[in-house]
C-alpha cells in the first residue's frame, strides 16, 4: 500500500565518511573517524565452570582467567585433549599396545571410547592382584617328583622350567640341588613363572577380523574373535593346517586366497572345543552346541565345494578330520583326508612350487602342514602312509625368514613385555621329525604294494641314531634347558613317544630258539644297548609330561594329550618289573595323574571321556577311590555313562598299545569299547540272575 500524500518518511542520515558531492555530509573536520573494531579472539572451547555460569571463557592453559579470579577448578573439556592423549599413548605405550590402539582407530572406533578403554584397563590392571608365581598345580596322591626319574642323568631336571618351578616352592628335596645363581628371580621371566594359558596373544589382526561376514551361524563377532584367540593359543600349535597370518589377513580384507566360508566355519567348529566358557563344548551331538552348529555349516559348505581343488578346501578338510577325531569318529573323518590328498596331488602341492610371493609361500607352508598330518596319522594309526616323500620345496631357515611361519607374541598379566613363542623353530623341527617318521612308517607298515621290511638290529639302530641326531640338533629355544611353552614340551613328548614305540617294538619281538650261542650272545648285547635307550626315553617322556602339568596344568584344551597320557598310563599299567613299595606308589601316582588329565581334557573332547572310562575300567578299587579323593573327580551319572557308549564310537585308533609291532586290530578303540560294553552287559546279566535266584530261595 502506497503512503498517502504528505506522509513524512523517517530521515536517513548519510554514512560516516560519505562523499559530500553525492549528498553526503563531511564530518571529518568535526569528529575523528572511528577505528574499525579488531577481530574478537574466539576461545576454542569453554571450561565447564564458565559454561555453567554462561560467561565468556578465555581458555588459557592450564587455567582460564575467569577461574583464576573466582579461585575455582578449571576443567577444560575439549576434544583436542582426547586426541592429544591418544597421541601420547601412541608415543609412550609398547609397540604391541600401540598397534592395537592404531588398529582400533583404523576400525573407526570413537576416540573417547578408545581412551576410556585404555585408561579403565590400566585402572583395573592396577587394582588386580599379582598372579601367584608359585606352582598352581600339585601332583595328586604324591606331591613330589618320583625318585626313579632322578636316578639317571636327566636333562629336564637341569632345565630353567624345572628350576623355576621348584625354586618357587617351599624348600624340598627336589630344590636343594638347584643352583641359586641359575635360578635367580632376575633371570626367570614370565613364561617360566606363570601358566601359559594366563597369557593373551598380541595380534592386531585378531581385533580387525569380522567373522560374521563369513558365517551364518552367529553375528556375535566378539564371541567369534574370542573363539579364534582360544584356538590359536590352545591347539593351533599342535594341529597346524594353515598359516595363521595369511588366514587372518584375508579374513579381515575379504580375500579368498587363504580364507573362505568353509575354512572359517571349520576353524570355529574346532575352536568351540577350546573355549572353556562353553561348558558343554564336548557334546558334539548337541544341536544347541556352537561346535555342532559350526560343524553342520562346514559340512554343508563342503558339499557345495565338492570337486573344487583349492588351498582353503584342503586346509579345511584336514581340520575336519581332526575335529572328528576328537569326537571319536576318525573313521568318518579319514574320508576328508583321503579327498584332500587327491586334491593336493591335482594342484601339484607337493611338487616344486611355481608360484611366487605370498601365494607360493602359503602353498609351501600348507604342503608341509599336510605332510606332517599324514605322517602323524600313519604312525599313530598303524597304517600305510599316503605319501612316500616329503614336499620338494624345503622350508626356509626360521632365523633367516621368520615371517614365513608367523610368530606368536604373548603378553602375561602385569608384564609390559611381549614374548615370542619361537613358532618358526617349532614348525621347522617338527617337519624334520615327520620326515623321519614317514620313512619309518613306510618300512614298518609298507607303502602301496610294498610290503613292510623286516626289523633288524641294524635297521632299528639306524633309525634310532637318526632320531637322536634330530634331538641333538634342536635349536637353543627348543633345547631341554630352555623349553617352556606347551608346544615345546609337546614336541619333546612326541619325539620320545615315537622312540618308545620303535624300541619297544624291536625288543618285544619273539626270540629265536635255534640261534647259535655266539649269535645269541651278540643279540643280547645289542638288545641291552637298545633297552638302555628305551629306559632313558621312558624317563624323559614322563619327566616332560610331569613338568608340563606342574607349570601349565591339564585344564586347557590340547588335542595331543589323549595320545600322550594314554601311552604313559598304559606304560605304568603294564610294567611291573619293580615291585618295591616306593615304586608301586609312584606308579599309582602316575596312573592317577594320567586319569586326571584325561578327565580334564574330557571337558573339551569326547575322545578323552572315552579314554577316561577305559582307564577307570582297568583301575583297582583302591586306585578308583584315590582318584576321586586326590583328583577331585566325581562319579559319572547313569546318563553320562549311557552317552559314552560303544555305539557312539566310530574310531580305529589303537589304544592300550606301546609297541609299534603289536597287532593293532583288537586294540582299536571301537573294538575295545565293544568288548568293554559286552563285559559290562554280561556282568549285569549275572548280577540279575543271582538276584533272581536269591529271591526264589527266599
Image (cartoon, rainbow, N blue to C red):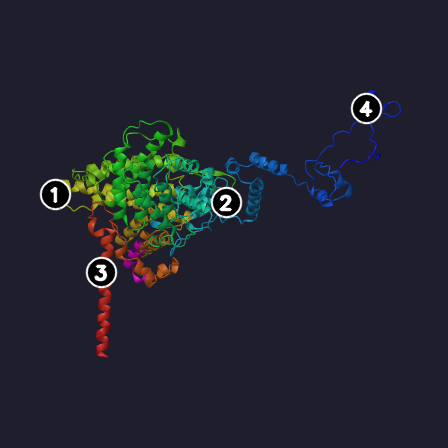
Disc 2 secondary structure class: loop
Marks 3 and 2 in Cβ contact (< 8 Å): no
Q: Residue furthest front?
A: 5
Position of residue 23 in the picture relative to residue 186 (left or right): right
Q: Relative to 151, is 61 above or below?
A: above
The answer to whether residue 432 is visible is yes
Q: Which mark is residue 18?
A: 4
Identify the residue shown where x is 33% and y is 60%. 640
Marks 3 and 1 in Cβ contact (< 8 Å): no
* Residue assigned mark 3: 678
What's the magenta bit mostly, secondary-structure-wise?
Answer: helix
Please tell me which of labels 3 and 4 falls first in the chain.
Answer: 4
The picture quadrant where one finds residue 247 is: top left
The picture quadrant where one finds residue 119 is: top right
Q: Residue furthest right?
A: 30
* Residue assigned mark 1: 515
* Residue 276 x %, y %: 42, 51
* Residue assigned mark 2: 413
Judge depth for marks 3 and 2 and give the one in front: 3
The answer to whether residue 532 is visible is no
> Is 615 in the magenta?
yes
Q: Relative to 398, is 139 above or below?
A: below
**Between residues 598 and 152, which one lies in front from this camera angle?**
598
Disc 1 secondary structure class: loop
Amino acid at each position: 500500500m502506497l503512503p498517502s500524500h504528505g506522509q513524512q518518511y523517517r530521515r536517513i542520515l548519510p554514512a560516516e565518511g560519505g562523499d559530500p558531492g553525492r549528498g553526503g555530509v563531511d564530518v571529518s573536520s568535526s569528529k575523528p573517524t572511528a577505528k574499525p573494531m579488531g577481530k574478537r579472539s574466539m576461545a576454542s572451547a569453554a571450561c565447564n565452570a564458565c559454561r555453567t555460569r554462561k560467561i565468556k571463557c578465555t581458555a588459557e592453559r592450564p587455567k582460564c582467567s575467569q577461574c583464576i579470579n573466582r579461585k575455582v577448578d578449571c576443567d577444560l573439556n575439549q576434544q583436542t585433549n582426547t586426541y592429544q592423549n591418544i597421541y601420547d599413548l601412541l608415543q609412550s605405550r609398547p609397540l604391541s599396545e600401540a598397534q592395537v590402539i592404531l588398529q582400533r582407530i583404523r576400525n573407526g572406533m570413537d576416540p573417547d571410547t578408545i581412551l576410556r578403554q585404555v585408561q579403565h584397563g590400566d585402572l583395573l590392571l592396577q587394582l588386580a592382584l599379582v598372579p601367584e608365581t608359585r606352582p598352581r598345580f600339585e601332583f595328586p596322591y604324591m606331591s613330589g617328583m618320583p625318585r626313579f626319574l632322578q636316578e639317571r642323568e636327566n636333562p629336564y631336571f637341569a632345565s630353567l622350567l624345572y628350576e623355576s618351578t621348584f625354586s618357587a616352592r617351599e624348600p624340598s628335596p627336589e630344590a636343594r640341588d638347584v643352583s641359586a645363581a641359575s635360578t635367580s628371580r632376575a633371570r626367570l621371566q614370565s613364561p617360566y613363572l606363570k601358566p601359559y594359558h594366563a597369557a593373551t596373544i598380541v595380534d592386531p589382526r585378531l581385533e580387525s577380523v569380522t567373522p560374521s561376514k563369513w558365517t551364518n551361524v552367529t553375528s556375535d563377532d566378539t564371541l567369534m574373535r574370542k573363539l579364534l584367540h582360544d584356538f590359536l593359543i590352545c591347539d593351533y600349535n599342535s594341529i597346524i593346517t594353515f598359516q595363521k597370518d595369511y588366514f587372518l589377513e584375508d579374513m579381515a580384507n575379504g580375500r579368498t586366497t587363504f580364507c573362505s566360508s568353509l575354512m572359517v566355519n571349520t576353524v570355529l567348529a574346532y575352536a568351540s572345543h577350546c573355549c572353556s566358557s562353553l561348558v558343554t563344548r564336548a557334546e558334539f551331538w548337541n544341536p544347541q552346541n556352537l561346535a555342532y552348529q559350526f560343524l553342520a555349516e562346514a559340512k554343508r559348505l563342503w558339499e557345495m565345494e565338492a570337486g573344487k581343488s583349492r588351498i582353503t578346501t584342503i586346509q579345511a578338510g584336514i581340520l575336519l578330520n581332526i575335529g572328528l577325531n576328537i569326537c571319536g569318529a576318525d573313521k568318518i573323518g579319514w574320508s576328508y583326508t583321503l579327498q584332500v590328498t587327491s586334491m593336493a596331488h591335482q594342484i601339484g602341492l607337493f611338487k616344486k612350487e611355481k608360484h611366487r610371493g605370498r601365494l607360493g609361500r602359503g602353498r609351501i607352508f600348507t604342503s608341509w602342514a599336510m605332510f606332517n598330518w599324514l605322517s602323524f596319522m600313519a604312525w599313530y594309526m598303524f597304517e600305510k602312509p599316503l605319501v612316500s616323500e616329503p614336499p620338494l620345496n624345503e622350508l626356509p631357515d626360521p632365523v633367516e625368514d621368520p615371517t614365513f611361519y608367523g610368530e606368536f607374541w604373548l603378553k602375561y598379566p602385569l608384564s609390559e613385555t611381549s614374548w615370542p613363542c619361537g613358532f618358526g623353530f617349532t614348525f621347522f623341527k617338527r617337519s624334520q621329525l615327520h620326515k623321519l617318521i614317514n620313512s619309518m612308517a613306510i618300512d614298518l607298515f609298507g607303502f602301496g604294494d610294498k610290503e613292510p621290511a623286516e626289523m633288524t638290529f641294524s635297521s632299528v639302530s639306524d633309525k634310532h641314531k637318526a632320531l637322536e641326531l634330530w634331538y641333538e640338533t634342536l635349536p637353543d629355544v627348543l633345547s631341554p634347558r630352555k623349553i617352556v611353552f606347551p608346544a615345546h614340551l609337546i614336541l619333546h613328548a612326541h619325539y620320545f613317544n615315537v622312540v618308545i614305540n620303535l624300541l619297544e617294538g624291536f625288543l618285544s619281538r619273539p626270540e629265536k630258539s635255534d640261534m647259535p650261542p655266539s649269535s645269541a650272545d651278540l643279540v643280547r648285547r645289542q638288545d641291552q644297548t637298545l633297552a638302555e635307550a628305551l629306559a632313558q626315553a621312558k624317563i624323559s617322556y614322563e619327566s616332560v609330561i610331569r613338568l608340563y602339568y606342574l607349570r601349565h596344568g591339564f585344564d586347557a584344551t590340547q588335542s595331543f594329550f589323549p595320545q600322550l597320557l594314554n601311552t604313559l598310563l598304559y606304560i605304568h599299567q603294564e610294567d611291573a618289573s619293580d615291585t618295591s613299595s616306593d615304586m608301586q606308589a609312584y606308579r599309582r601316582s602316575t596312573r592317577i595323574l594320567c586319569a586326571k588329565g584325561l578327565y580334564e581334557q574330557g571337558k573339551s573332547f569326547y575322545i578323552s571321556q572315552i579314554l577316561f572310562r577305559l582307564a577307570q575300567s582297568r583301575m583297582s578299587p583302591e586306585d578308583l577311590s584315590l582318584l576321586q579323593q586326590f583328583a577331585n573327580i566325581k562319579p559319572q551319572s547313569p546318563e553320562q555313562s549311557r552317552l559314552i557308549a560303544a555305539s557312539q564310537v566310530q574310531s580305529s585308533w589303537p589304544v592300550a598299545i606301546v609297541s609299534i609291532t603289536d597287532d593293532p586290530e583288537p586294540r582299536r578303540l571301537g573294538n575295545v569299547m565293544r568288548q568293554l560294553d559286552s563285559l559290562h552287559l554280561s556282568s549285569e546279566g549275572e548280577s540279575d540272575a543271582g538276584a533272581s535266584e536269591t529271591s526264589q530261595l527266599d
